[in-house]
Amino acid sequence: MPSSLPSKSAQSASAGRTPLAVYALTAGAFGIGTTEFIIMGLLLQVAADMHVSVSAAGLLVSGYALGVFVGAPVLTLATRRLPRKAVLLGLMAIFTLGNLACALAPNYEMQMAARVLTSLAHGTFFGVGSIVATGLVAEDKRASAIAMMFAGLTIATLLGVPFGSWLGLLLGWRAAFWAVAVIGIVALVILALFVPRHVGAGVAPVALRDELAVLKRPQVQLGLLTTVLGFAGLFTVFTYIQPLLTQITGFSSGVVSAVLLVFGAGLSIGNIAGGKFADRGLTRALVVTLALLTVALLAMGLAIHAKIAAVIFIGLLGMAAFSTVAPLQLRVLEQAGSAGRTLASSLNIAAFNLGNAFGAWVGGVTLDHGPGLAGLPIIAAAISGAGLLLALFSVRSARTAQVVAA
């Protein structure tokens, strides 16, 4: 599994040009991000059509995320000796077929199975893509390259998810999944055209034993758990954003798509800002962005009761949430070492999605057995706050280990 790519691309990037291959990865991320998040804007419609509760429909988010959690390490190890471009194209094909299955699913059980099938491509795509992206640019641009790839997720939230919500309201929620399948085909073509065939050529795969050894590193374990908790807080709220906005804030269903545009805009700004922040100082960026996410979730507990305040703070929540992505991903990559970077990269994508699944589950429990919708932001802030405390512990323990080693 390659840890670096041809230096010519990195040299051109250091001269100020981002390689086209990075933008191709962004296109793939856009497709995957759209299908991951689109269900949030259609939750009430899917629940009604499938004759299940809103909390049960929310488990479609958990099912997808758990599929990523399982699929990421398994597919990463299974494809470790294959050409990187072929892996990326194969994963995008799985993604497209999965969305077709979602559009055709006749019942809740088949919809869950289709969501899990779709999710299998997610973790390995971003894990392999992160390694490819960082290898295409100069050393001091690695976090920004990761952020550029993940910009596909933010653009998906900014454009893909609101469009899917609007299309779902207009033509039925299945139409949204048909549209995402088309996006998958387009992304497949873009990847085929612009990702170089020689990506990873000439670099011997890391031995399986060395890849798996990354799991024994305490700092990698702490980094993965920090990612889980940080994003669990976000998805405790975001999974149920449609009922929050309609039942607590008082927006009509038609307005939700417009409000999601604000959230998506916040994600886009926060993602790029977080990458640049991490390039200047990874440890500081990690702690500060997790602190901002915790504060934003706390503020949502008050803001959600007033329409103008809710819109403003949803945008701020998006900024805070995705400012954490590049620092969290790069932290795990740095602690993994060269031998285990690809597996660690995929595992951290799995950790993001385990956080998504855990957050959606906690949100459902809060709806059914806890304080209800209004209590979601406070519960969410407590979870992300735990992630912040773990990050502080991780940073301190790493510094202590360095002092002892010296």
Image (spheres, helix red, strand yellow):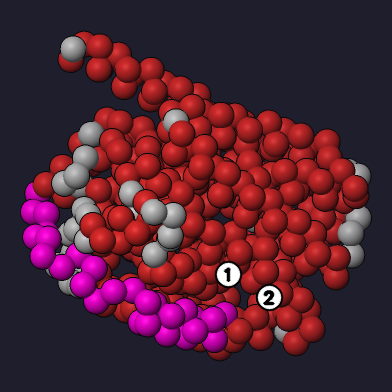
Image coordinates for residue 145, horizontal then vertical, percent: 42, 53
SS of the residue under disc 2: helix
Position of 341 compared to 54: left or right? left
Name the residue located 47 percent from the left edge and 37 percent from the top edge.
278
- Assign the N terminus to one quadrant of the image: bottom left
Name the residue located 43 percent from the left edge and 77 percent from the top edge.
95
Query: Can the viewer see residue 88?
Result: yes
Image coordinates for residue 6, horizontal then vertical, percent: 22, 61
Residue 42 is a magenta residue: no
- N-terminal of the pair, mark 2 or mark 1, is 1
Name the residue located 18 percent from the left edge and 12 percent from the top edge.
406
Q: Which residue is mark 2?
A: 164
Q: CA distance from mark 2 to mark 1?
A: 8 Å
Region in magenta: 180-209
The reply to whether the C-beta atoms of the residues labelled 2 and 1 are less than 8 Å apart is yes
| Residue 219 lies in quadrant | top left
Tell me which amino acid carries mark 1.
Answer: Thr
Tell me which amino acid carries mark 2.
Answer: Gly
Image coordinates for residue 398, horizontal then vertical, percent: 31, 22
Between residues 270 and 193, which one lies in front from this camera angle? Answer: 193
Image coordinates for residue 50, horizontal then vertical, percent: 66, 77
Q: Which residue is mark 1?
A: 34
| Residue 394 lies in quadrant | top left
Residue 192 is a magenta residue: yes
